[in-house]
């Protein structure tokens, strides 16, 4: 039960500026996901909170207590590591109870707590096993149980699902969400997987080159990305970007279609998500170079002009490869970006 | 590489050798090379053991018997020889002190190399090995003088100090590779869950590194056990077994030399056999 506040966090690795003045506020019981490509600084930020790295500047507070000056062991946090970091020379029970032993809990209380937490993650039957005798998913559960057992103020998770195979990852994701929702622990979760972020987060903080570019609810980040980086990072298949040329003030032409756009701009980038396109008698001109019938929908890819343009069409409709489609975009979902990639919010004419 | 091999396997006017023939030839060369190396090392050991367990008559006879007679006469005589048991005790005591000393000093250095980035790390690693490049005979005189000044000349402790210096490079490098093999995340997990550095080492790193630490200790023991030059130069009253044998067996009959040799070789060989896996790890050869 805690609120975590980061302010002005700065970190260099030699000449490399890894974190540039990060401000972040994680409210009590919130599930915040740090999302970004590898090398964006998200893991470094998490490790600074954990006390495994020190920031060059800035502060970390839990409620009103400053913790960035404390040793990792005094911060009363817990962490789940990417490769689980389950102690190989201890049984599952000893692993789960490790934090409690360090806090000098009485043995019988540790045993009770270990059994209680093991039941939550379905490990009751495996308490006497060693890490080498467990599957990847089971090791993941041990790491989670070890973190839950100490009832941390803030739970830190560093890509905890990325070493699992796809099916198991899906299953663990749902379990993780249920368990953490029940424990009501404030959580920071680092991932590069945007689907994971969308599915788990109360809020997503999207990071790029040491900066949090946008921090909002999953749907808001999806619908109203602040720039082309966020727009392209979130969503699979990603958002389409099309060059739009003004034909008069507030009117643009893109892929052979005239569209109303923000006033006062000459050239803009038009962003449209593949699922916001419908086949119509006229619209954005799109030669169907590649047609993939994926089941839930049919993915049509156009490579015209060296640019990839995708549309996710209803699967009921047969599309012949090579045919030219005209696609009507959902006007309310169109987003406009300027030359620097920032979203333009000027009213559409 | 693949391209080169393929090219060689092409049947052409200049190269009639097929890939299969080339590989077969390579295998033959490797096989005979390995066999020669084994014979080079093992034959003297074999002769040593055969003769140590044979009666004096058999040792001097020709042709040699292929199997030992299981006659412990030579060995029994050696153990009864004036001073052998004392020298054996000196050797054990010095080797034990060397073992403790080199692990106590070498393991922290190995840990530092494995876990920390510091200025001059590469140079430090090189310097550690270079201590072995310094010829011991050159050190002998100044060391003897200094030991005399300190009053530790001709003491087991003084010799153990010197042997520790000799064993230290290996202790540092073995423990370095050992601690590098313990994932740093395990240590970080220990810190996050309430350990300070020392507790994390005790609860997590040490248990995982223990087999390797034992190997490093045993290796130090063997280095001390086999060392003869310093032991012969620095010690007068308290000679260790190799130094004692070097001095007194010089004039002894053949059977006693063989028995003495066997007495020296056996413990070292047994220990090296026990820790072979960890020594391979030190040299970067995966042997699992």
Image (tube, coloured by chain):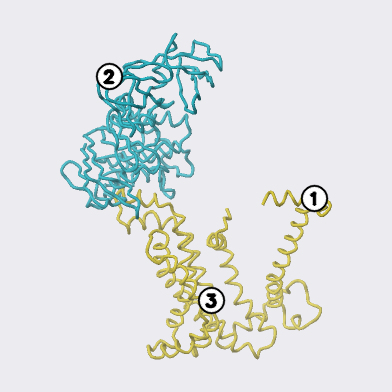
Mark 1, residues whose alpha carbon is within 10 Å: few (<14), some, or many (≥20)?
some
Find residue B98 and report its horizontal and vertical position in percent: 46, 74
Residue in the image at 65% along x and 80% along y:
B259
Camera sees residue B5: yes
- Secondary structure under tag 2 reads loop
In the image, is B152 to the left or to the right of A72?
A: right
Q: Which mark is residue B18?
A: 1
Q: Nearer the viewer, residue B221 or A82?
A: A82
Q: Dividing the image into 4 quarters, which one contains the C terminus of chain A?
A: top left
- Secondary structure under tag 3 reads helix
Query: Are the residues flagged by discs 2 and 1 from a single subunit?
Result: no
User: What is the distance, in whole Å, between disc 2 and disc 1 at their CAs?
Assistant: 75 Å
Q: How many marks?
A: 3
Looking at this view, name the residue that lies furthest to the left. Answer: A64
Q: Are the residues flagged by discs 1 and 3 in contact, CB closer than 8 Å?
A: no
Question: From the viewer's perspective, is the residue at label 1 or at label 3 nearer?
Answer: 1
Find residue A309 and report its horizontal and vertical position in percent: 46, 24
Q: Chain of mark 3?
A: B
> What is the letter of the cyan chain?
A
Residue in the image at 79% along x and 82% along y:
B61
Looking at this view, name the residue that lies furthest to the top. Answer: A281
Chain B painted colour = yellow
Q: Which mark is residue A348?
A: 2
Find residue A269 and report its horizontal and vertical position in percent: 36, 27
Residue in the image at 31% along x and 52% along y:
A12
Q: Are the residues flagged by discs 3 and 2 in contact, CB closer than 8 Å?
A: no
User: What is the distance, in whole Å, between disc 1 and disc 3 at their CAs?
Assistant: 52 Å
Q: Which residue is mark 3?
A: B225
User: What is the distance, in whole Å, between disc 3 and disc 2 at their CAs?
Assistant: 88 Å
Relative to A9, say whether A216 is above or below: above
Camera sees residue B86: no
Q: Nearer the viewer, residue A218 or A342?
A: A342
């Amino acid at each position: 039960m805690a609120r975590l506040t980061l302010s002005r966090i700065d970190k260099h690795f030699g000449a490399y500026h890894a974190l540039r003045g990060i401000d972040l506020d994680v409210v009590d019981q919130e599930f915040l996901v740090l999302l970004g490509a590898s090398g964006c600084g998200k893991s470094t930020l998490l490790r600074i909170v954990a006390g495994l790295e020190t920031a060059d500047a800035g502060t970390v507070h839990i409620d009103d207590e400053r913790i960035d000056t404390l040793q990792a062991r005094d911060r009363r946090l817990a962490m789940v590591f990417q490769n689980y970091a389950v102690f190989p020379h201890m049984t599952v029970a000893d692993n789960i109870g490790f934090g409690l032993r360090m806090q000098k809990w009485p043995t019988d209380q540790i045993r009770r707590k270990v059994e209680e937490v093991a039941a939550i993650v379905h490990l009751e039957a495996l308490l006497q096993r060693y890490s080498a005798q467990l599957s990847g998913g089971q090791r993941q559960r041990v790491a989670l149980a070890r973190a839950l057992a100490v009832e941390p103020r803030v739970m830190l998770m560093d890509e905890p699902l990325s070493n699992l195979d796809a099916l198991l990852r899906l299953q663990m994701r749902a379990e993780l969400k249920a368990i953490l929702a029940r424990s009501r622990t404030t959580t920071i979760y680092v991932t590069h997987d945007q689907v994971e972020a969308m599915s788990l987060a109360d809020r997503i903080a999207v990071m790029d080159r040491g900066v949090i570019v946008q921090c909002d609810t999953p749907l808001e980040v999806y619908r109203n990305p602040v720039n082309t980086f966020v727009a392209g990072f979130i969503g699979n298949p990603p958002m389409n970007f099309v060059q739009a040329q003004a034909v008069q003030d507030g009117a643009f032409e893109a892929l052979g279609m005239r569209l109303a756009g923000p006033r006062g701009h000459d050239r803009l980038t038009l962003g449209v998500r593949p699922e916001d396109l419908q086949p119509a008698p006229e619209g954005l001109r799109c030669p169907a170079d590649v047609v993939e019938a994926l089941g839930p929908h049919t993915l049509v890819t156009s490579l015209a002009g060296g640019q990839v343009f995708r549309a996710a069409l209803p699967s009921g409709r047969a599309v012949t490869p090579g045919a030219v489609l005209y696609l009507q975009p959902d006007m309310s979902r169109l987003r406009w970006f300027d030359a620097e990639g920032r979203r333009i919010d000027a009213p559409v004419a | 590489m693949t391209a080169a091999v393929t090219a060689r396997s092409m049947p052409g006017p200049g190269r009639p050798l097929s890939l299969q023939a080339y590989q077969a030839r390579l295998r033959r060369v490797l096989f005979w090379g390995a066999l020669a190396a084994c014979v080079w090392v093992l034959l003297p050991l074999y002769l040593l053991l055969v003769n140590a367990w044979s009666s004096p008559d058999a040792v001097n006879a020709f042709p040699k018997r292929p199997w030992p007679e299981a006659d412990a006469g030579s060995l029994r005589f050696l153990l009864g020889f004036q001073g052998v048991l004392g020298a054996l005790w000196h050797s054990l005591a010095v080797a034990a002190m060397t073992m403790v000393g080199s692990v106590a000093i070498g393991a922290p250095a190995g840990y530092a190399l494995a876990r920390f980035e510091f200025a001059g790390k590469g140079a430090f690693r090189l310097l550690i090995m270079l201590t072995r490049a310094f010829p011991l005979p050159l050190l002998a005189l100044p060391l003897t003088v200094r030991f005399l000044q300190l009053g530790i000349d001709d003491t087991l402790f003084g010799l153990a100090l010197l042997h520790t210096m000799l064993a230290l490079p290996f202790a540092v490098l073995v423990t370095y590779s050992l601690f590098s093999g313990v994932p740093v995340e395990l240590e970080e997990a220990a810190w996050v869950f309430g350990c300070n550095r020392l507790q994390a080492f005790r609860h997590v790193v040490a248990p995982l590194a223990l087999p390797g630490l034992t190997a490093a200790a045993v290796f130090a023991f063997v280095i001390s056990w086999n060392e003869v030059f310093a032991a012969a130069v620095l010690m007068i009253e308290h000679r260790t077994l190799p130094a004692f044998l070097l001095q007194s067996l010089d004039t002894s009959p053949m059977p006693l030399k063989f028995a003495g040799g066997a007495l020296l070789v056996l413990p070292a060989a047994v220990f090296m056999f026990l820790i072979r896996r960890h020594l391979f790890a030190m040299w970067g050869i995966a042997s699992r």
